[in-house]
Image (tube, rainbow, N blue to C red):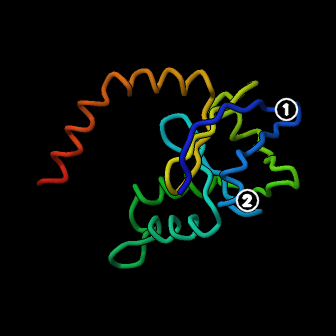
């Protein structure tokens, strides 16, 4: 399970060190793709295969016939990149993904169970401040959805 929050510096070549705890679980190759809420998603190859199958799934197995599914699949697959973790645990974040979330000097690397998220560290802090204030309400809402 991928959990925890780490703040790491981005070097001049757009490389960032993955936390050693994550590297042990992720392997040598990973998939990095645009995420939701102003972050990037990182999946292991195995988890990406599961996500890919779920995104392509439809009752007729013709997901390309559904406009919303086509659009979202383009978003996720079109800008995805297979990236190797180098011998000292760094990954190279492609410029188009780095620019998308305005990464500059530091990034927040967040373990979220089955994926890792990369955030602009300032946006991550702002997001967490908002979520912290709403945590009780969110828990209540999610708890009520489970009992329906």
Depth check, mark 1 against mark 2: the one in front is 1
Label 2 neighbourhood size at 10 Å, few (<14), some (14-19), many (20+)? Answer: few
Task: Identify the residue at horizontal 56%, vertical 42% (top origin).
Answer: 4
Residue that carries the numbered disc 1 in the rendered image: 11
Q: Is residue 34 above or below residue 38?
A: below
Which secondary structure, mark 1? loop
Q: Separation of disc 1 and disc 2 at Cα?
A: 20 Å
* Quadrant into which the C terminus falls: bottom left
User: Are the two marked residues, 1 and 2, in contact with CB atoms closer than 8 angstroms?
Assistant: no
Q: Position of residue 91 (x, y in %)?
A: 79, 48
Residue 14 in percent (x, y) is at: 82, 37
Residue at x 73%, y 59% (from the top left corner):
82
Q: Closest to the observer: 42 or 35?
A: 42
Give the left or right position of residue 72, taking residue 109 as reference: left
Residue 27 left/right relative to 33: right
Residue 29 vs residue 53, the one in the foreground: 29
Above or below for 71 versus 117: below
- Report the residue that reaches farthest toward the bottom: 60
Picture layout, residue 56 above or below residue 18: below
**Tag count:** 2
Instruction: From the top left corner, tell me how far across and down residue 139 is, in percent.
Output: 26, 38
Q: Residue at x 62, y 52 (%)?
A: 42
- How would you rate the neighbour count of disc 1 (Cα within 10 Å): few for under 14, some for 14-19, many for 20 or more? some
Q: x%, y% of residue 132? A: 38, 25
Q: Earlier in the sequence, mark 1 or mark 2?
A: 1
For residue 78, which numbered disc appears in the image?
Answer: none
Which of the 4 image quarters holds residue 16? top right
Classify mark 2: helix, strand or loop.
strand
Q: Which residue is mark 2?
A: 82
Q: Residue at x 70, y 59 (%)?
A: 24
């Amino acid at each position: 399970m991928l959990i925890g929050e780490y703040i790491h510096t981005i070097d001049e070549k757009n490389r960032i060190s993955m936390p050693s705890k994550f590297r042990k679980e992720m392997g040598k190759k990973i998939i990095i793709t645009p995420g939701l809420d102003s972050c990037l998603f990182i999946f292991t190859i195995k988890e990406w295969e599961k996500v890919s199958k779920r995104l392509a799934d439809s009752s007729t197995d013709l997901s390309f016939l559904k406009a919303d599914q086509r659009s979202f699949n383009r978003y996720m697959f079109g800008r995805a990149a297979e990236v190797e973790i180098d011998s000292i645990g760094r990954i190279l974040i492609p410029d188009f993904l780095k620019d998308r979330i305005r990464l500059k000097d530091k990034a927040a690397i967040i373990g979220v169970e089955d994926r890792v998220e990369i955030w602009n560290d300032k946006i991550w802090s702002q997001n967490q401040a908002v979520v912290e204030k709403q945590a009780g309400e969110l828990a209540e809402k999610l708890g009520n959805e489970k009992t329906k």
